[in-house]
Amino acid sequence: MATPIETLEAASAEIAAGRVQKGARLAYEAAFRAVANAAKRHKRPCETIEDARKFVCWLEGLPSEPDDPVDNAPLFDRDEDGQPIPLPAPEFIGAFDIAESFKHHGQSPIELTYWEADEYTMFLPAIQWLVEEMETAQRRDPSAWMR
């Protein structure tokens, strides 16, 4: 079986050759497999797209359990001037959202997709980043969300 990075390379080649739907399917496959491999290393389930989404949220340190104290924490703290201090930006979630878009484009009739041909190439670096980051990804400290 090809590694996620090898699958991503195949996706890139398919997209470059104009076979964007096949490339999109392969790009999603690379991303999902990378996430599933990381989930396995962290002893977390990842059989479905819902499992993968829960896992990337878990990596971000977001609350996932109903009793998690983060659920009741304020969305942001305020600095000494009363200005909101923003929360950290979720990175894995955004990249996985792009992977899900690749999945949609790979499964939908081409006339129902909304990307132009060059946009497939434009979004591939997000998938590459996700695949590479999953190799060593560690969970973000949940306290980052409790300001």
Image (spheres, grey):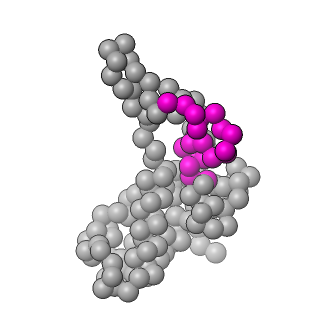
Q: Where 104 sits versus 56, above or below?
A: below
Residue at 56%, 58% in the rendered image: 53
The location of residue 124, given as percent across then percent down, is 38, 64
Nearest the eye: 66 or 129: 66
Q: Quadrant of residue 116?
A: bottom left
Is residue 56 inside the magenta stretch? yes
Q: How many marks?
A: 0
Q: Nearer the viewer, residue 71 or 15?
A: 71
Q: In the image, residue 16 lies at what x, y percent? A: 32, 76
Is residue 45 positioned above or below 75 on the image? below
Q: Quadrant of residue 39?
A: bottom right
> 55 left or right of 132?
right
Say left or right for 26 vs 36.
left
The residue furthest front is 72
Query: Which x, y percent locates residue 82?
Result: 34, 18
Residue 118 appears in the figure: yes
Query: Is 16 a magenta residue?
Result: no
Could you tell me which quadrant the N terminus lies in?
Answer: bottom right
Figure check: 46 above or below 57: below
> At 36% from the left edge and 26% from the top edge, which residue is drawn?
84
Q: Residue furthest right?
A: 43
Quick check: can you spot residue 127?
A: no
Left or right, 79 with reference to 92: left
Q: Nearer the viewer, residue 111 or 128?
A: 111
Q: What segment carries the magenta color?
A: 55-74
Q: Residue at x 47, y 77 (%)?
A: 25
